[in-house]
Amino acid sequence: MNPETMNKTLISISKWGKATGILFIIMGAITALSGAFFFLIGAVPGVLQIISGIFLMRSAREAGQMAEHNSGQSEDLMLENYAKFVKMQGIYLIVSIAVSILAIIAFFIFLMLGIADGLFSDTYSTY
């Protein structure tokens, strides 16, 4: 990649990374607050989003510094923070999938309990 294209890409990563990081933090806070009302564990996905947003913002900051100074240390830090961001997103997805599967299982269990309850109750009794 030629230096001019790389510089434009780094500037784009810097701008969009900061904005997206802020949005991750805001959405994470909303998710954590809404999840905390149901169960304490419901706040975990929001906390993971907040942490991901922080790592993304750090990566964006390093991309901006790399565009200005083109130092090897900035590149290492940018990639390190981006790797942490990707890892946190993976953990967030795993937690979200697990919670979704548990919710589906709970739904079917409650549905079956409701059906079973209906089999043993005398709802059409004429007293």
Image: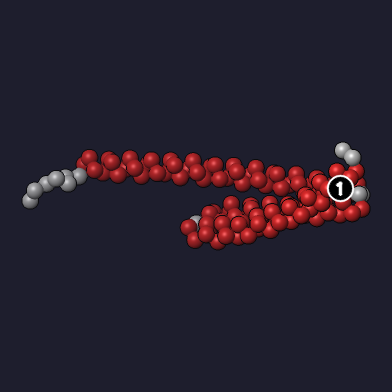
- The kind of residue on which mark 1 rests is Asn
Q: Residues within 10 Å of mark 1 (few under 14, many from 20)?
A: some
Q: Position of residue 103 (x, y in %)?
A: 46, 45
Left or right, residue 17 beside residue 37: right
Q: Quadrant of residue 47?
A: bottom right
> Whole-percent x and y of residue 85?
71, 47
Please state the horizontal and vertical placement of residue 79, each as a whole percent of the image. Answer: 80, 45
Query: Which residue is rendered at x = 86% and y = 54% of the image?
Result: 65
- Residue corresponding to mark 1: 7
Tell me what residue is drawn at x 73 percent, y 47 percent: 84
Q: Is residue 88 visible?
A: yes
Residue shown at the point (74%, 56%) measured from the top left:
18
Task: Work out which residue is located at the far top of the displayed protein and give it.
Answer: 1
- The quarter holding residue 15 reads bottom right
The image position of residue 77, as x and y in percent, is: 83, 49
Classify residue 52 as left or right of residue 70: left
Q: Residue at x 81, y 46 (%)?
A: 9
